[in-house]
Image (cartoon, rainbow, N blue to C red):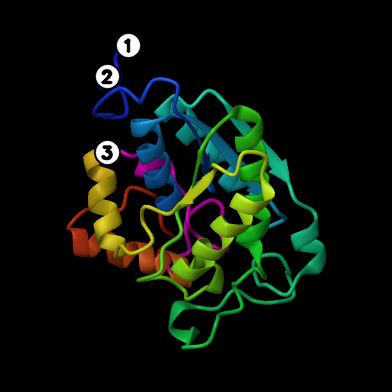
Amino acid sequence: MGPGDEGGLKHLPQKGSRAVVLLSGGMDSCVCAALAVRDHDAAALHVSYGQRTEGREQQSFQSICDRLRIHDRMIIKNEALRMIGGSALTDESIAVPRAEAVGHNIPVTYVPFRNAHFLAAAVSWAEVLGAQKVYIGAVEPDSSGYPDCRPAYYKAFNEVVKAGTREGNIEIVTPLIAMRKAEIVRLGLELDAPFDLTWSCYSHADQACGVCDSCVLRLRAFQVAGIQDPIPYAAR
């Protein structure tokens, strides 16, 4: 089976070039994974941290890996973030707000310093695999405004990785960080990224709620791109 037979991948990855991609199972990380597979021999890492839709996100992770033919995959359990709490995603006593209730401040769905935990694990695995790239689908425009999705954060983190790894040659790459969500949808379509397998909802695991910030941003992106979102939503 050739690289264009399934998943729409345009060409063979660079021989011997390895990458680790952080794959949550959401729309952005799925497109990031499709990019990583196109350009490298990719391994996928998923971190479960006690979030509300933990099981559903794991299901998406495995299905996306199957569709993109990512064989090297790992699921890590992070107990710290749920124990620390402070987020509507990890603390059942904090309600997930509707999108219209999210203002200009950092919303309660922010998980404190979450991406540092994810990146630390991904960089560690990259060292073992001999991978020189770590992909993460962080996005700054059309996002909830999380501080660990800013370009300055990744610039600083790359300095830490350079100073704190054996060879100092691992780079965290954020190919989507400056893109609008609709642009990410269009890019995903070009790559045949399996949007039908993704999950973005913060609160529901059967049908997406359609009203949380993540759902609204996603629905708006597909609408602007002129494409029907392929996942099921609860009647609103």
Toward which corner of the image does residue 127 lie, by quadrant? top right
* Amino acid marked by disc 2: Asp
* Amino acid marked by disc 1: Met
> Is-magenta flag for residue 146?
no
**Residue sitting nearer the eye, 45 or 229:** 45
Q: Which label is found at residue 134?
A: none
**Residue sitting nearer the eye, 235 or 185:** 185
Image point 80% across, 58% down: which residue? 80
- Which span is picked out in magenta? 192-210
Look at the picture and state if 166 lies above or below 200. Answer: above
Can residue 79 be seen here? yes
* Image position of 229 (left or right of 166): left
- The residue carrying pointer 2 sits among few (fewer than 14), some (14 to 19) or many (20 or more) residues within 10 Å by Cα, namely few
- The residue identified by callout 3 is 191
The image shows residue 84 at horizontal and vertical percentages of 80, 68
Contact? badges 1 and 2 (CB < 8 Å) = yes
Image point 22% across, 51% down: which residue? 186
* Amino acid marked by disc 3: Leu
Q: How far separated are the C-alphas under marks 1 and 3?
A: 17 Å
Toward which corner of the image does residue 107 lie, by quadrant? bottom right
* Image position of 15 (left or right of 75): left
